[in-house]
Amino acid sequence: MALQTYPERPAPVRVVSQAIGGWIARLGAVWVEGQVAQLTRRPGSRTAFLVLRDPAADLSLQVTCPMTVLAAVEPPLTEGARVVVHARPTWYFPRGTLSLAADEIRQVGLGELLARLERLRTLLAAEGLFDTDRKRPLPFLPRTVGLVCGRGSAAERDVLENARRRWPAVRFRVLEVVVQGPLAVPQVLDALRALDRDPEVDVVVLARGGGSVEDLLPFSDEALVRAVAACRTAVVSAIGHESDTPLVDLVADVRASTPTDAAKRVVPDVEEELTGLRQCRDRGLSALRHRLDRETALVASLRSRPVLADPHQAVALRAEEVAALQHRAHNTLGHRLDRAVDDLQHVRARVRALSPAATLERGYAVVQRADGAVVRSPAQVEIGDRLRVRLAEGGLGAIVDSSPERA
């Protein structure tokens, strides 16, 4: 039942605290999972005190338990361990504090941790967070490299020294955080978000040295994995060694086997780039020289051709060809004229042989009447008819004065 309070009739603090305690008591015993952030054993006390923390949130609860319950945990409980606690929430109303009274504590074993990680990996893979098509390429030369690492860690030195050895002008923004234990996930999340908001940071490196599965567990936390997937900036994961594969390796844009490998991936090697530039320059010069040599040889070849070496020679050759053609044409025409003259003479000879004039030259004459008709028979003329006698060298006139004689 809700408290009935009014401005005129407010409830005292003790009443409100008692009401809260009643509501919490109705929750009953629950199983709670968390990470032991603090463990306190007071000498001579029968009660142990734990601080149970949620790795994915900045939230913790006080847990109390009998020393016998704590002693029954195998292996012995240490700070940073993952546990499952069966406890009843209690409200201490004199101070207004919430705590858990545990009657059983189970330490999460390695096998159970790996099984949980596998279930989480399957879930995230089904959501597409590990797909290669969503991974972004790293910039060739980032303006600033964001680095999230442990305080004064070897991973930080490896990344900084190797990156500066490769590219001395590289700039870093380093955020040092706790990289294992209950505070690791919140601090890494805050650092990651801060670097992702920085417009000068083009790539973020998450770096940590090797360790056990429990040590690397924060980098398989679901909240951190989803935060990496939501980053707008490219993320390089360099957690542990080659054999270590926390879930953040699968969601990051690039997985580096070690922090040293991450340094090699985020910046180019200035010596390699200079060598590549020299090689490109040498190849360009070589290609240019070969091209010039080919063009020079082509020009020399063209200049050595007769048409360019002695242009008049081509004209002279054509003039000789024209003269030869003219001579052939003249000879051909002469031969044809000679043959035509011969043919004409032969025709003339045949014509003359067949011509009446040739007959006349042998002493014969052609007699024609006044109308031009040739007289072939005496019966064709009468006495007194005028006739024309055609001879070889002219003609003469005649008059018929006697009767025609019959042959």
Image (spheres, rainbow, N blue to C red):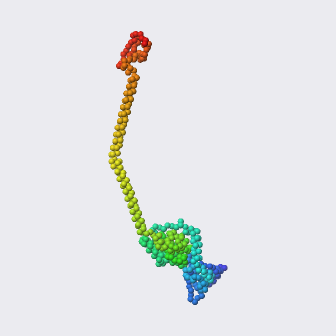
In the visual, does 287 lie left or right of 148? left
Q: Quadrant of residue 53?
A: bottom right
Name, please, the residue furthest toward the right: 1
In front: 147, or 347?
347
In front: 302, or 44?
302
In front: 331, or 382?
331
Up-down: is 340 above or below 173?
A: above
In front: 317, or 109?
317
| Residue 390 horizontal/vertical position (percent) | 38, 17
Indicate the quadrant containing the C terminus: top left, top right, bottom left or bottom right: top left
In the visual, does 372 lie left or right of 74? left
Is residue 18 something that shows in the picture?
Answer: yes
| Residue 52 horizontal/vertical position (percent) | 57, 80
| Residue 235 horizontal/vertical position (percent) | 50, 70
Q: Look at 58% across and 84% down and name the residue there.
A: 49
Up-down: is 225 above or below 333?
A: below
Q: Quadrant of residue 90?
A: bottom right
Q: Look at 39% across and 27% down and name the residue there.
A: 347
Is residue 391 something that shows in the picture?
Answer: no
Name, please, the residue furthest toward the bottom: 44
Q: Look at 40% across and 16% down and name the residue there.
A: 367
Q: How many marks?
A: 0
| Residue 118 horizontal/vertical position (percent) | 58, 73
Indicate the quadrant containing the N terminus: top left, top right, bottom left or bottom right: bottom right
